[in-house]
Image: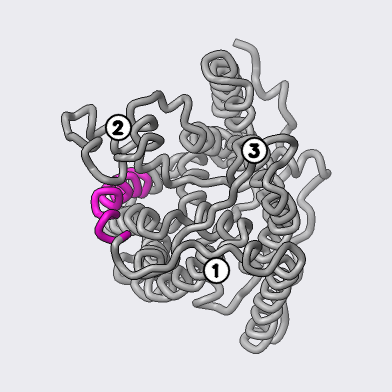
Amino acid sequence: MADLSLTMPAAQPGRPPIHGLAAAFSLLLLALVAMWLAQAVSGRQALLFAVGAALGFALYHAQFGFTSAFRVFISERRGAGLRAQMAMLALACLLFFPALAAGSLFGTPVKGNVEPVGLSLLTGAFLFGIGMQLGSGCASGTLYTVGGGSIRMIVTLFFFIAGSVLGTLHLGWWAATPHLAGISLLKQFGLMPALLLNLAVFAGIAALTVVLERRRHGSLPSPASASGPGWRRILQGSWPLLAGALTLAVLNFATLALAGRPWGITSAFALWGAKLLAAGGVDVASWPYWSSADKLAQLNGSLATDITSMMNVGIMLGALLAAALAGKFAPVWRIPLRSLLAATVGGLLMGYGARLAYGCNIGAYFSGIASASVHGWLWFVAALIGSYFGVWARPLFGLSRT
């Protein structure tokens, strides 16, 4: 067998060596799945899979965690993660709003994620906030850490799927609770006022984090220095948070252009779990959640045709490639029991909460705000409050509050 390390950048002093076997395996799978999708489904589906892989690569190398950003701000008043999120959202709005106002992008009809506002949303986002702190990862964080080799996060993902299915079973009841129809700021105020309003709020939140961080610590930490030549850092990491944030915004816009709607994650978890139950003889098709023609077609169709499922697979494989190139693919099999319990509870709460809240940190928060939807902002507030309680509960499971 050829020495795979000869075809890849050599390790720098102090940098772990590239995991050649894992890198080759991930590249092979990425190529094979992309070619299969192009033949079996469409070239567009293959491109969306590739966008998913790029998202996983960027998430891993930037270590872009919504969960850790919330936790560090709550426990230490460090706001770099939240400021990166505000930059990501600002660029996303600049890209999304004109396209959504026009109704099409490069000839493709586009529609944002605008969902109802009510008890279901607030409860679901609150539960998700608790869950992501106990699970130590949000929806995107769970996928990219699973791809990066985290055994604990595989447990989180399993129960994330279980909680998602349970959420679909109960969603009819929650949907009947008091709520308002989805509110689009674009429709309420028009393009420029809605855009300027959102940008002002992003700037205000970023400024507030600076004030609170300086009040607690006296100053902001100095940015980390580059760890090598630009091309090597792109391939092997690590990336600055801001670079990761802006990359995610651009890739979400690419998803909008290709799929006609923004990036989402957790609807696929509900689909995966429902298919497993159906294969075991459970009549999930009779549940109200699956009663629409579109949902029933998803349930009865191939996962290859489901955009969110294929993008999720892409995220995991892209993160695997990033971890291998960074020399960090090293699964740890011995996990404390209390940590596994936290992963279980956290996964269940995130899965259940995401269905009640019409999405997760990606579909509801990131893509919701990028879609000019009020529900995205309310998700952010409720999940931040839930994260406060989740951070408080972490030591009960042997986890640090930082």
At 72% from the left edge and 65% from the top edge, which residue is drawn? 195
Q: Nearer the viewer, residue 161 or 354?
A: 354
Disc 1 marks which amino acid? Trp
Circle 2 sits on which residue? Answer: 275
What is the magenta segment's predominant secondary structure?
Answer: helix
Q: Which residue position is annotated with label 1?
A: 377
Spatial separation of the CA atoms under disc 3 and disc 1: 26 Å
Q: Is residue 334 visible?
A: no
Residue 81 is situated, as x and y percent measured from the top left of the image, at 62, 65
Tag 2 and tag 3, C-beta contact below 8 Å: no
Between 18 and 149, the one nearer to me in the picture: 149
Residue 169 sits inside the magenta stretch: yes
- Binning the other alpha carbons within 10 Å of mark 3 as few (below 14), some (14 to 19) or many (20 upward) gives many
* Foreground residue among 35 and 29: 35
The residue that disc 3 covers is 54
Q: Which tag, 2 or 1, sits closer to the chain's start?
A: 2
Residue 185: % across, % down: 62, 66
Q: Reply above or below: 36 against 399.
A: above
Corner quadrant of residue 126 = bottom left
Q: Which mark is residue 111?
A: none
**Vertical order, 138 against 157 (above or below):** below
Q: Residue at x 49, y 62 (%)?
A: 182
User: What's the amino acid at mark 2?
Assistant: Lys
Location of the N terminus by quadrant is top right
Question: Bounds of the magenta span?
Answer: 156-175
Q: Nearer the viewer, residue 358 or 129?
A: 358
* Circle 1 SS class: helix
Residue 77 image position (x, y, % from top left): 58, 79
Q: Residues within 10 Å of mark 1 (few under 14, many from 20)?
A: some
Q: Mark 3 against mark 1, which lies toward the viewer?
A: 1
